[in-house]
Image (cartoon, rainbow, N blue to C red):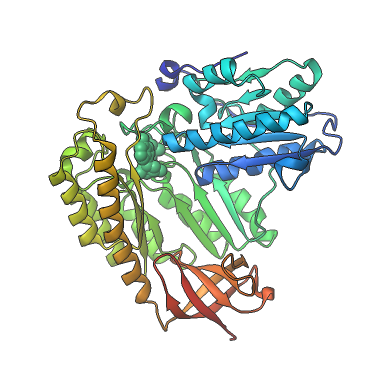
Amino acid sequence: MKTPNMLDAKKRNQNDIKYVKYNKEFDKFGNGKKFFVRTYGCQMNEHDSEKIKGMLKSVDFSEGTSVDDADIVILNTCAIRENAHDKVFGFLGVLKHLKQSKPDLLIGLCGCMAQEEVVVNDILNKYKYVDFVCGTHNLDNMLSIIKNKIDTDKRQIEVLSYEGDVVEGVPVVRDSKYSAWIDIIYGCDKFCTYCIVPYTRGTQRSRKHEDIVEEVKKLVSDGYKEVTLLGQNVNAYGKDLYKDYDLSNLLSDVSDTGIERIRFVTSHPWDFTDKMIDVIASRDNIMPYIHLPLQSGSNKILKLMNRKYTSEEYLKLYNSIREKVADSSVTTDIIVGFPGETEEDFLETLNLVEECKFDGAFTFAYSPRENTPAALMKDAIPEEVKMDRLHRLNEVVNKYSNLRNQKLLGTTVKCLVIGESEKDKNKVCGYTENMKLVNIEGPKSLIGNIVSVKITDTKSFSLDGEYIKE
Ligand code: 5AD
Ligand code: SF4
């Protein structure tokens, strides 16, 4: 048994990071049994789940359609806010009942919550029906953990609080045939004071650029139209590995593969260079969409958050992106109710949002995370004040999403059609180059293609359009 330790998780570079190939050999111990993976949180977790599915299928497990027909259920969890925790513990309650009627059901937990000391202690003491826990640094070892559980019938808790290797070639079963996630950098060294990610995902580790480019080339030959390069802070790509190769070089090299669409998330303003903006602006297959978290418009709060930029610096970068990258859209993340945030600080955030007129924003009420510096800060903001600010902020954010969307009315845009529309099964849906969701009147045969669409109506969170034959 290995359990997590938050103090160890804070340390950096105590281990040399090794670059290794996935070479685990097992007999086909899945025997056709069914698995169900439930994913919480960000795109990196979505992609980790694709690896979990890939590993399980490689030993002859098959994917079930729901928890009810599953022999093994895995919860790939998120720790970013308390409500993410609550959802997981709520679902574990449902699984407890299921296990009473199906005692052979295996239940496993992985992802960011598995890296938290408090969570693993709770699992050990209160959730005894959870059969295995696997951390983020040893995800590639999940099959051994499951096999040990099956062979010994003993609970397996295997969580490392130091970085694992960068493992290439983990089997992956992608959810989409057209658009693929690609990890480029793991972990985060920024230590924003509110954030648990540097503890749950460890130190910044870039993948080698040749491995990334190889992966993209293979996807191109498999018919993929789009890749999204993933990292907690993609703009730090390469800093831990190379002297003179950064995200701008990687974007150029990925662009040269000829893949039709390249996206990347998430950006940190601190590491965003002019060179990166120039590459984005100059390459047709790098999409003009940037997610650029602001977090707060108050310099006092930004400092307390350890964001390492001022609102003026953010605005300068923001304007430079808008000026250089044609028809770009920019979205952001904002936290309200950080400890010590006064009404004046909040108004500064509102002012900056008024000035930037973002295409969209993910807005959050601050949620204290155990062992992070902000959790110890004084002047906590009452819940009702946080909710009031969130509500006021969302009104302004929605006003500008609407206005930005309205500008597209009547224009013809390119969309990658990804599937049936969730709103109307007779329509399909897809994304514009600048990442607007469009519900499209057009045949199902468009799915998987990049097509022209005329925008016929706009809403806050989506657009309506009709397919234009060329
Ligand atoms: N409370 C509220 N929001 C948070 N985020 C990260 N940590 C917290 C927290 N403790 C938000 C940030 C980040 C996004 C992924 O989640 O805005 O950009
Ligand atoms: Fe968290 Fe800040 Fe790292 Fe983003 S950059 S993952 S908010 S610590």
Residue at x 55%, y 68% (from the top left corner)? 430
The relative height of residue 288 versus residue 65 in the rendered view (above or below) is below
Q: Is residue 51 left or right of residue 165?
A: right
What percent of the width, then of the height, locates residue 174? Answer: 66, 50
Ligand 1 location (quadrant): top left
Q: Quadrant of the C terminus?
A: bottom right
Query: Is residue 202 among what the camera can see?
Result: no
Q: Position of residue 268 (x, y in %)?
A: 34, 45
Along the horizontal axis of the image, is 326 left or right of 171? left
Left or right of residue 168: residue 293: left
- In the rendered view, does 287 fall on the left or right side of 316? right
What x and y, as percent, mark residue 366? 32, 38
Counting from the top left corner in percent of width and height, residue 39 is at 59, 42
The N terminus: image quadrant: top right
Question: Relative to 394, is 8 above or below?
Answer: above
> Splitting the image into 4 quarters, where does residue 335 fall?
top left
Residue drawn 53% across and 19% down? 122
Residue 456, can we see it? yes
Rendered image quadrant of residue 169: top right
- At a point 44% along the width and 37% down the height, the residue shown is 83
> Which of 5/257 is in front?
5
- Residue at the image point whose x is 53% and y is 55% from the top: 254
